[in-house]
Amino acid sequence: MKYTPKKEPSPKNVVSPSVIKRLPRYFRYLRILIREGKSRISSGELAEMMGVTASQIRQDLNCFGGFGQQGYGYNVTYLYAKICDLLGVGAGLTAIIVGAGNLGRAIVRSSMFEKRGVDVVGMFDVNPLFLGQDVGGVLVHPMQELDDFCRKHKIDIAVLTLPKEAAAETAAALLGLGITGFWNFTGQELELGEAAVVENVHLGDSLMTLCYRICSEEEKNGK
């Protein structure tokens, strides 16, 4: 049976944040299916893999046009390509990391940027011991060069791993330099208005959620 995908409406319609947060999971699971050589999959099979319901998958994907065909399911390669488009994979986005300490170094050395099509082009720090170092193929520059660097390069994303006390001032300066995407690991909640997109990451919150779930399970089991 020849696969003919549904024509999708524009994805610029209002989509709930909960649906958007699930898109990266589709990205990850579809990568697995492609590596396994799977050419098509039903919503039920994908739901079983992801631990959700088939109805949830259909509802999520219908927000962007569906991408499937009744009686056929989903073409894995096609669906993966559409999810990549929605998530900006391959859009040529560039990033800098502000803060070359342990967290910044761990982040830049990971493969997540490359896998998601984001090019990290520079790191910045005030510590003279870090300056000029190559960290995972990325050079650490002094903060004094930040303005000129951002004006010479089109930077889409600033990854903030600096002390929380400097987060708001630094983010405001970066916004003034034309950067509109912020991945914030400082622990300081940032609100930069409608001109910017901010993802505030609180690692401690995730740890505490894990601790809560462990304690809840132990209490339920009478431990």
Image (cartoon, rainbow, N blue to C red):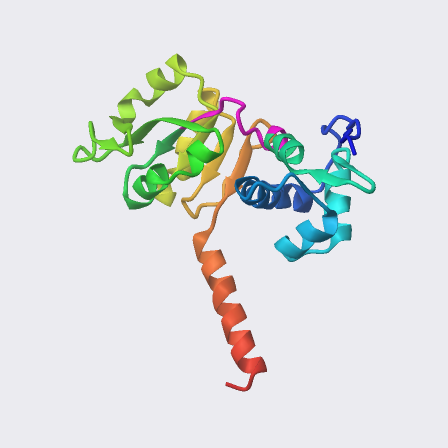
Residue 80 coordinates in the image, percent (x, y): 62, 35
* Furthest residue toward front: 1
Residue 192 coordinates in the image, percent (x, y): 53, 33
Left or right: residue 23 versus residue 160 is right
Indicate the quadrant where residue 72 lies: top right
Residue at 44% from the left image edge and 53% from the top image edge: 203
Left or right: residue 39 versus residue 104 is right
Residue 163 coordinates in the image, percent (x, y): 34, 43
The reply to whether residue 145 is in sight is yes
Residue at 61% from the left image edge and 28% from the top image edge: 85
**Which residues are drawn in magenta?**
85-95
* Furthest residue toward top: 152
Q: Is 88 within the magenta?
A: yes
Q: Nearer the viewer, residue 132 or 115?
A: 115
Report the label total: 0
Q: Is 5 within the magenta?
A: no
Residue 132 coordinates in the image, percent (x, y): 20, 27
- 59 to 129, vertically: above or below: below
Q: Nearer the viewer, residue 198 or 73?
A: 73
Dividing the image into 4 quarters, which one contains the N terminus? top right
* Furthest residue toward right: 70
Q: Nearer the viewer, residue 89 or 33?
A: 33
Residue at 51% from the left image edge and 30% from the top image edge: 181
The reply to whether residue 162 is in sight is no
Residue at 42% from the left image edge and 44% from the top image edge: 185
Indicate the quadrant where residue 77 lies: top right
* Furthest residue toward left: 129
